[in-house]
Image: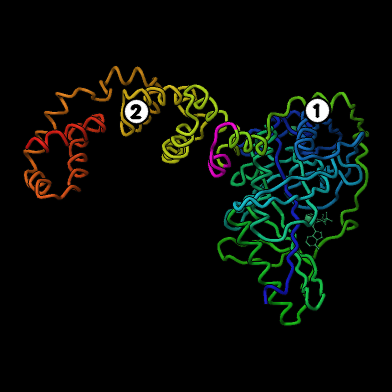
Amino acid sequence: MKDDYKVVIGLEVHVELNTESKAFCSCSTNFGAKPNMNTCPICLALPGTLPSLNKKVIEHAIKSGLALNCTINPFFTMDRKNYFYPDNPKNYQITQKNYPICEKGYIDIEDYKGNIKTINIERIHVEEDAGKLIHIQDKTLVDFNRAGVPLIEIVTYPDLCSAEEAVLFVKTLKAILTTCGVSDCRMEEGSLRVDGNISIKNKRLNIQGNRVELKNINSFKSLEKALNYEIDRQIQLMNMDKDIKLETRRWDNDKGITIAMRDKEEGEDYRYFPEGDLTAYKIEESYIYKISQSIPELPRSKYKRFISDYELSSYEADILSQDINISNFFEKAALRSGEPKEAANLILGEVFRILKERQKEIQSFNITGYDLGELILILKEGVISSSTAKVLMEKMFLTGKSAKDIIEEENLSQNNDKDAIGEIVQKVFNSYPKAVEEYNYGKRKVITFLIGMVMKESKGRANPELVKDIILKKLNEV
Ligand code: ADP
Ligand code: MG
Ligand code: ZN
């Protein structure tokens, strides 16, 4: 049945720009401030106030447009979108309708099988965010700190064909925008918000269903679940010959269902008209060029370079190229040590584990990529064993000290002392005479057990190669 249907998805992605001040006034955009502290007569829309456009907003929007392969229009205007809602003090939102800042872009998405698909972008426009309503029992409070915070809205063409593709698109978009430094794109903090538009077509009967718009999606998991739920709901309706209403629905994450909110509004409902308090703006070519020079290497190019230059697997390269702080950390470690594979291994394993345990991000990590590179060098020299390296990383993280200093202070260097290891081996033989006996009866496998016991006894510091040699030598002596 499902095979009869073609799924069509288009996304509208709102991204909060990380400017210091709001779009049309000088209030701070700082997240987490006390309610209504970041407000002034302009963003509270008191009578007689006038907006003035923050230049950084335009710079970030153009930067995003360039990174998403858009055309940057030679001029743009702002418009008013009129609606009443208590989180919006002006009763209209300043946005862009007819002359958006960027149009016609695309990005490529690549799935885990290596299939590449181009997703086209219709436009990117600038607008302001609304405040927040806080519902407490039977009362509703309003916080205007977010009112006037700058957003870009990225509108895709309906080129996506599944929930998985939509998630991949948003992940790819996030990697590009965070790398450019225009936003932190944190879905859980609301700095990246997605509306999904979905329709289905019965290919066999050639019936096209109406488009449904989905709101209130605030994580990658919800995005996937909400879209899949909606696809199934629409297929069921069409199978029963029922109409799919053109409407806006909201995702209820607790119940795991979409719920009808309102009929889909049309452009006329918003009575769009030009924002007379702001003029039309011209964008100079030289300004666009200057911004283009400030765009760092983007994740896709980095991904390819990590595979070709460092011989990483596509899995490793993918994870290490998504976040600019992680990729910088990795490259510093790789270049310092000359061991990119080892650096990738330690970052994907130990570093991520430590960060996750302590709920830290790599920017606030006590170890730099350079420090990790030094640790890898010491490991390669055979001064420490790989199990000691792990312990060492924990300590480096806790104290912020270099690997060398900790090794010296705590006498952690690997034991290459044949006599010392010989003593430990003898001790283990004495403790496990049965194992030694079994070896003599031909059970060669006990060697692994004996090596393990010696390593344990030496607290992981004995050189494993030496341990093996010495055990074999002693066993054959017995
Ligand atoms: P609005 O602003 O009213 O939501 P737009 O025309 O700007 O309307 O379209 C919004 C989104 O809807 C775009 O992302 C677009 O790709 C998507 N879309 C358009 N047609 C369809 C369709 N038939 N099925 C699914 N999505 C669609
Ligand atoms: Mg919409
Ligand atoms: Zn303000």
Q: Secondary structure at mark 2?
A: helix
Q: In screen coordinates, is 474 left or right of 194?
A: left
Q: CA distance from mark 1 to mark 2?
A: 47 Å
Indicate the quadrant containing the N terminus: top left, top right, bottom left or bottom right.
bottom right
Q: Where's ligand 3: which quadrant?
A: top right
Q: In screen coordinates, is 427 left or right of 446?
A: left
Q: Amino acid at mark 1?
A: Lys
Closer to us: 14 or 327: 327
Indicate the quadrant containing the C terminus: top left, top right, bottom left or bottom right.
top left
- Mark 1 against mark 2, which lies toward the viewer? 2
Q: Which residues are magenta?
A: 309-318
Tell which circle, 1 or 2, labels the residue nearer the N-terminal end.
Answer: 1
Q: Residue at x 80, y 53 (%)?
A: 157
Q: How is the image coloured?
A: rainbow
Closer to us: 172 or 443: 443
Q: Are marks 1 and 2 in contact (CB under 8 Å)?
A: no
Residue 136 % position (x, y): 58, 53
Q: Which mark is residue 55?
A: 1
